[in-house]
Image (tube, helix red, strand yellow):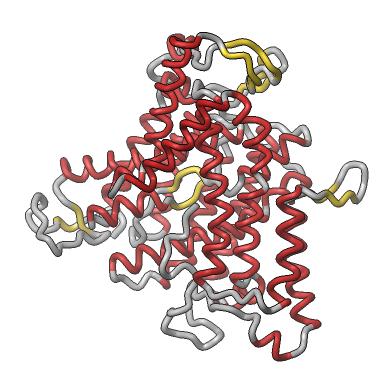
């Protein structure tokens, strides 16, 4: 099924109620056009997050295409999806770099997280979701996602926003207006439109106002400089592989590289696995609802495939991957769920990844533009945690839910540190996750029976039969949402 598609009707016309199934396709010219839409939809976030994490955006785009093809093969073409760059690791990566870690440690830690995610997917495929739900109920999952997002607030305040506060402010407003005011596909690519707007705005400000004296992330200090710099774009070749990671004047220039492994870095990124489980669950549930297909049997495959995609990408220095809601929006708008369009999108992304000139263009994105976009994106990641609570009916009148989660969130957002030795400590996201999970289970074990019975919350069914007896899936995690950032 994954590489054989039936032609839908005549391949060119669709009736008002027609739906193109994952194993069908339209004519190849229309399929290529749809694939191009998917590329545009995933484009902005897929190369913004590598920039934020200090990784190579050209390599990230190329590996996202390779990871997407691997995903489609593993799920046997039953779950149409594009694997773009995950935002769930951004906070942990910032913490790793703050402790002196380089890109090799970053990608090594994320690779291990990908292995763990793949293993969780395999367990879900064979055992069902009962054990997973007991360990990570919605109240805990929502808390971890929330602290991952809000832990990033200081990154915006100290790194991106100060580079050009007025451009950042205008880009932020533009992003909000596009996301809320535009309808259909245009609203789904608000980040991409904001990038274009911010780039043009920065160029205009350079022409009108000249140099700016502000924090320069490249130099690591306040300098006088133009907002835009096109010299790297002019010097780059049109075609070629991403360059190797090198050091220039004591500063790392990210490219492809082999990962290295640090226990401290690995512990920092592992909480993101919880967010990825929620993201992938929500994606498959959303696609199942739109297509009318029962995708529970391939839920474990989808989660494992995302983990394998992350392993493939980071093994050469690329960025972590995850399923993208932006592409769900394209499917919802077109009612075309053909995986053929995703193969086309993946191939186009690989071609972009073979252009150093494209990589140079992405790398030259002005800091103020990233400031305006990240202030929205990071807040959206955090509020997704509240969305999980709301959709699963978490009762915060119950102290089992309220007290442990409150402690974990404040530790995560405040970047509290617990030092064990001179060389090892748990900080921020990692410590907050440990506290939220462990303290929740401690509180539940100590609480009276009536409080425990009301603390379960909704039931997550992600493969096989749910062990709590709810077989209709009404209370499934993210059943009504797309599980995105």
- Image location of residue 411, percent across then percent down: 76, 55
Work out whether 189 lies above or below 300: above
Quadrant for residue 163, please give it: top right
Q: Which residue lies most toward the bottom here?
A: 449
- Image location of residue 37, percent across then percent down: 28, 42
Q: Residue at x 71, y 58 (%)?
A: 409
Quadrant for residue 299, please give it: bottom left
The answer to whether residue 331 is left or right of residue 81 is: left
Could you say which is closer to the camera, residue 228 or residue 276?
A: 228
Quadrant for residue 176, please give it: top left
Could you say which is closer to the camera, residue 395 or residue 142?
A: 395
Q: In which quarter of the image is the N terminus?
A: bottom left
Q: Which residue is drawn at 56% across and 35% down?
A: 316
The answer to whether residue 261 is left or right of residue 24 is: right
Work out whether 130 lies above or below 408: below
Q: Which residue is drawn at 55% across and 10% down?
A: 211
- Image location of residue 458, percent across then percent down: 54, 78
């Amino acid at each position: 099924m994954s590489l054989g598609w039936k032609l839908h009707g005549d391949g060119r016309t669709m009736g008002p109620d027609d739906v193109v199934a994952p194993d069908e396709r339209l004519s190849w010219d229309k399929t290529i056009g749809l694939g191009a839409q998917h590329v545009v939809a995933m484009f902005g976030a897929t190369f913004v997050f590598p920039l934020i994490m200090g990784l190579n955006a050209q390599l990230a785009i190329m590996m996202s295409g390779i990871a997407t093809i691997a995903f489609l093969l593993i799920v046997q073409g039953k779950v149409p999806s594009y694997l773009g760059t995950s935002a769930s690791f951004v906070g942990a990566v910032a913490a790793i770099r703050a402790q002196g870690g380089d890109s090799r440690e970053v990608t090594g830690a994320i690779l291990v997280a990908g292995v763990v995610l793949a293993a969780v997917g395999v367990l879900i495929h064979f055992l069902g979701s009962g054990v997973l739900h007991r360990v990570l109920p919605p109240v805990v999952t929502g808390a971890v996602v929330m602290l991952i997002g809000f832990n990033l607030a200081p990154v915006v305040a100290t790194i991106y926003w100060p580079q050009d506060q007025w451009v950042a402010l205008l880009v932020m407003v533009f992003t909000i207006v596009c996301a809320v005011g535009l309808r259909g596909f245009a609203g789904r690519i608000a980040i991409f439109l904001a990038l274009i707007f911010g780039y043009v705005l920065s160029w205009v400000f350079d022409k009108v106002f000249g140099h700016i004296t502000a924090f320069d992330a490249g130099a690591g200090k306040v300098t006088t400089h133009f907002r835009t710099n096109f010299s790297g774009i002019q010097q780059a070749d049109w075609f070629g592989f991403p360059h190797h990671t090198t050091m220039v004047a004591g500063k790392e220039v990210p490219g492809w590289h082999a990962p290295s492994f640090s226990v401290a870095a690995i512990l920092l990124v592992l909480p993101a696995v919880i967010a990825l489980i929620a993201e992938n669950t929500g994606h498959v549930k959303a696609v199942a609802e739109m297509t009318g297909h029962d995708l529970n049997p391939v839920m474990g495959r989808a989660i494992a495939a995302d983990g394998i995609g992350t392993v493939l990408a980071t093994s050469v220095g690329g960025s972590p991957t995850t399923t993208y809601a932006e592409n769900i929006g394209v499917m919802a708008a077109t009612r075309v769920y053909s995986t053929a369009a995703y193969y086309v999108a993946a191939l186009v992304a690989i071609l972009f990844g073979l252009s150093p000139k494209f990589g140079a263009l992405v790398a030259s994105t002005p800091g103020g533009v990233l400031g305006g976009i990240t202030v929205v994106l990071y807040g959206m990641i955090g509020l997704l945690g509240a969305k999980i609570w709301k959709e699963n009916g978490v009762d915060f009148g119950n102290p089992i839910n309220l007290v442990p989660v409150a402690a974990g969130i404040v530790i995560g957002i405040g970047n509290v540190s617990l030092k064990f030795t001179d060389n090892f400590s748990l900080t921020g996201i990692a410590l907050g996750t440990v506290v939220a999970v462990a303290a929740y289970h401690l509180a539940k074990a100590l609480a009276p029976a009536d409080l425990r019975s009301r603390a379960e919350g909704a039931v997550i069914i992600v493969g096989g039969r749910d062990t709590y007896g709810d077989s209709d899936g009404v209370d499934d995690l993210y059943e009504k949402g797309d599980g995105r950032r």
